Image (cartoon, rainbow, N blue to C red):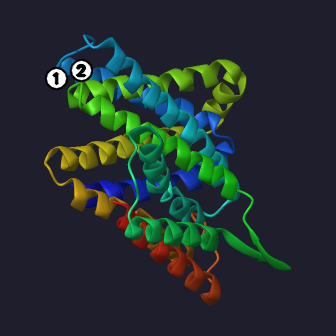
Amino acid sequence: MALAGTAAWAICNLIDKYLISGFFRKPAVPLFIGGIVQIILGFLAIAIFGFDYSNINAVAIVFLSGFLGFVASFFYFKALVHEEVSRVIPVMNAIPIWVVIIAIAFLGEAISALQGLGILLLLTGAVLVSLKKAGKWELGRSFKIMLLASVLYALEFVLLKYGLGLLEFWNVFFWSNIGFAAGSMGLFVLNRAEIIETLKRFRKESVLSAANESLSVIGYILIMMSFAAGLVSLSTAITVTQPVFVLVFATSLSIFWPRIIKEELRAGVLALKIIAIGLTVIGSLLLI
């Protein structure tokens, strides 16, 4: 389940890049579509499995996690506008670093030598995958945005994990979806004219975006179900390989269907990406 969910997320990353670069240009439209999809799927879930709001504190925490996921997704799309998808996703593997830091700050946990090595490898990989040569080697313009997104996703995951200990899975799914949708609706109010115009202009692409958001949610459900089945370590180890899927898919598309995704294919660039992604994967595994 975790492998299928991770592959689904990698496909979603590629479709996100295709849509945000060629049609939508700004995060508002895909985030609005994502909010609508999450509202529909959230209410469908509680219609089938039941509704629980007895623990108001837990509901508030899970709602906040969903809203943080929305803000993180905003920065994720901002990064995709300017950057190759195979450079964006590996930096997202920095999420385990922030989870460890949160655990140290609020739970008093200490890190082992292996975890320290994992942090070093992960940061090295994240920097390497973002390097670009423009007269001199320098970080890509979206590196800071991607790091910020990874911090927010880490906070979302910590709050979700806490909520799963207090509420049933499908109620956590519902309230986190509502938190995400609340952010989407706020963005719609601020960008109503632009969003409506874009939806009218790119109807087919909007339908594709809705299908893509649905696939992303399916991936999320598959991975969370693998956690619930008690395969947490194995499932987490599989999910950190998402950048590998993205690199393979993006490179293949760049070779055979460059109109969909076009990335640099020079041997030196590919070698650097492979090394960097390898470091982020190994570093992430050491932090699990």
Residue 67 at x, y = what percent? Answer: 50, 28
SS class, disc 1: helix
Q: CA distance from mark 2 to mark 1?
A: 5 Å
Badge 2: how crowded within 10 Å, few (<14), some, or many (20+)?
Answer: some
The structure residue drawn at horizontal position 67% and vertical position 21%, both measured from the top left corner, is: 192
Q: Amino acid at mark 1?
A: Phe
Residue for point 66% across, 34% down: 198
Label 2 sits on a secondary structure element that is helix
- Residue 4, given in percent of the width and then of the height, sits at 27, 58
- Residue nearest the observer in this picture, 24 or 241: 241
Pick the front one: 242 or 287:
287
Residue bearing the label numbered 1 = 49
In the picture, measured across the screen, residue 99 lies left or right of residue 199, that is left
Could you classify mark 1 by the number of other residues whose Cα lies within 10 Å: few (under 14), some (14-19), or many (20 or more)?
A: few
Q: Amino acid at mark 2?
A: Ile
Please tell me how many numbered marks the rendered image carries.
2
Q: Position of residue 83 (x, y in %)?
A: 67, 60
Asked whether the beta carbons under mark 2 and mark 1 sit within 8 Å of each other, the answer is yes
